[in-house]
Image (cartoon, helix red, strand yellow):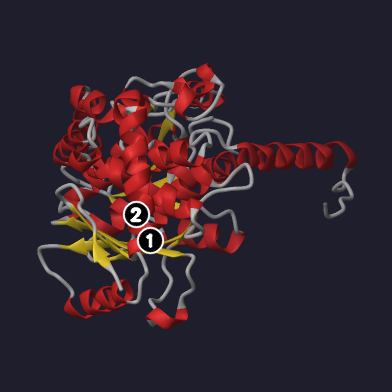
Amino acid sequence: MTQTAETPPGLYVRMAPDDAAAVEARLEWARDQDLARRMWAKDHTLWGPEPEEISNRLGWLSIAGDMLAGLGELEAFVEGVGRDGFTDVALLGMGGSSLAPEVLRLSFGTAPGYLQLRVVDSTHPDEVGAVADELPLERTLFVVSSKSGGTLETRSLYAYFRSLVDDGSHFVAITDPGTSLEDLAAKGGFRHTFYGDPAIGGRYSALSAFGVVPAALMGIDVRELLGRAELAARAAQAAEPEDNAALWLGVAIGELARRGRDKLTFVTSEPVSSFGLWAEQLVAESTGKGGTGVVPVAGEPLGAPSSYGDDRVFAHIRNSARPDEELEARMDALAEAGHPVMTVAVRDAADLGGHFFSWEFAVAAAGAVLGINAFDQPNVQEAKDRATETIEAFKRDGSFPETSPD
């Protein structure tokens, strides 16, 4: 048995009565906590006791408007690149610096007269060598993208491609102010450096320079993309959950995870079928810590309702302009079997702007429900630190240090 929940416009949710009752109780908690207003007020106590660390990671709430205000510089840059004969752009980056551009590439493609984007996020020698062979290096712009400026893989990729193209005008940096990459760009004669917002973590940076600069180079209408993000942001300011789809979605995801339904399974449609690539990192890194969290599942072939246990929640990104009748029937079957199915609509690829924002807001709200800091990344940083220590040990000793599994 299943029932349809009362939800804000743009969100359609079906779930079993016991799950629905638990979510409704948690929504009442969100009202009592004044959750939406406190999120916009950057109240760090929603996520943890570290006021500076959390409050300084909420720049994504207003980044769409900030980017819109400064688009003139980017538009002039893109025009200049075209005049100078560039036809291709290779983005060198990892994780949050590469996932949003890749989703935008797969969703929009390249507009006529703009640059073909190639995301280079592997350090495997064969893959990197194949990219170098395929690109017209004399007409390729290389975007070196790293928030921290010191991402080892990104810096290694830069060193390789700079050895092939020793002309700084072929290189652009995207990084936060004051990083080592900013210094490298200045010393290396880069064509330009675009700056990220230090108050935004990598996985929340899709609507900042890290996503918008590659989008503009592909000829995507970034004013429309950011405009739809602005509309989503305004909608997310509603105090009441029944008027705030992003808040409702996040509270439901968090409460269902508390009840053991912690496998958030993305089912996506064209033109944004790749959306799960980006959402996967956002959900995993934001919620997976402290022995709790939500496990995102993206790109999994959709099975029969009986093949799933009671740990699943399905997030259906539905093309409202061209519905897939077969997929709709399969989602109906999942809902009828008692699996929670939360459906949000897209009209076209430009709706990605709104969905980037809405899902960031939802995941932050889910973190508040779960009682975790949605903005730190202790295990990610630990992995980076250990990688750096290992490389330094190899440089010093000529061999890798011995390790044992913990």
Q: Residue at x 39, y 38 (%)?
A: 365
Is 170 left, or right, of 51 in this rendering?
left
Q: Residue furthest left?
A: 321
Verify CB contact (< 8 Å) between mark 2 and mark 1: yes
Res 266 label:
none
Residue 16 at what x, y percent from top left? Answer: 34, 66
Label 1 is placed on what type of residue?
Asp
Between 215 and 56, the one lying in front of the other is 56
Q: Can you identify the residue that label 2 sits on?
A: 21
Residue 5 in which image quadrant: bottom left
Instruction: Tell me the element at label 1.
Output: helix
Residue 334 in which image quadrant: bottom left
Q: Can you identify the residue that label 1 sits on?
A: 18
Residue 95 at what x, y percent from top left? Answer: 49, 46
Local crowd at mark 1 within 10 Å, few (<14), some, or many (≥20)? few
Instruction: Tell me the element at label 2.
Output: helix
Label 2 is placed on what type of residue?
Ala
Q: Residue at x 47, y 69 (%)?
A: 310
Q: Residue at x 55, y 33 (%)?
A: 376
Q: Residue at x 46, y 32 (%)?
A: 201
